[in-house]
Amino acid sequence: MRILVVDDNPDDVVVLHLAAEQLWPGVVLDVVETGDEALTHLAGPGTERAGVVLLDWNLPGITAHEVIARIRAHDEWDRVPIVVCSGEDDPVIADSAALTAP
């Protein structure tokens, strides 16, 4: 299984990596820091497709909302599950993420 992690916080990436290894031994994490890098990675020739995208809500550059919209608009990626991750405890952010990523 491959997971594309989109997160600019190295500490969060370490935690996600440790958790993923325990849950799914042998999992491969492809890590990028921005939404633009995520879209480039998904479009890369010869890139094995991620089974899941773990997406930080607070990204530098284009927003997580825009990343989700672009993934959903792409014929080859529109069914890739997206899990939005955030350290925020604001219910408005949680509602917005849930509504953005059906």
Image (tube, helix red, strand yellow):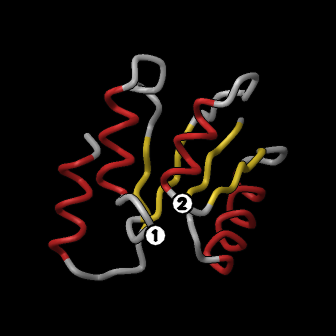
Quadrant showing the C terminus: top left
For the point 23% across and 53% down, which residue is it?
98
Decide if residue 86 is on the left or right side of residue 41.
left
**Amino acid identity at mark 2:** Thr
User: 75 and 94: which one is in front?
Assistant: 75
The residue to which callout 2 is attached is 34
- Residue drawn at (64%, 28%), measured in percent from left and top? 49
SS class of the residue under badge 1?
loop
- Residue 25 to residue 93: above or below: above
Residue 55 image point, x, y percent = 47, 56
Q: Identify residue type, mark 1.
A: Pro
Q: Relative to 7, is 70 above or below?
A: above
Q: Report the residue that reaches farthest toward the right.
A: 26
In three-dimensional space, the C-alpha distance between marks 2 and 1, rounded to whole angstroms, equals 6 Å
In-image side of 69 versus 84 (left or right): left
Mark number for residue 45? none
Q: Residue 60 carries which label?
A: 1
For mark 2, does the 10 Å Cα neighbourhood hold few (<14), some (14 to 19), or many (20 or more) residues? many
Across and down, in percent, residue 94 comes to 24, 66
Q: Foreground residue, 74 or 5?
A: 74
In the picture, measured across the screen, residue 4 lies left or right of residue 27, that is left
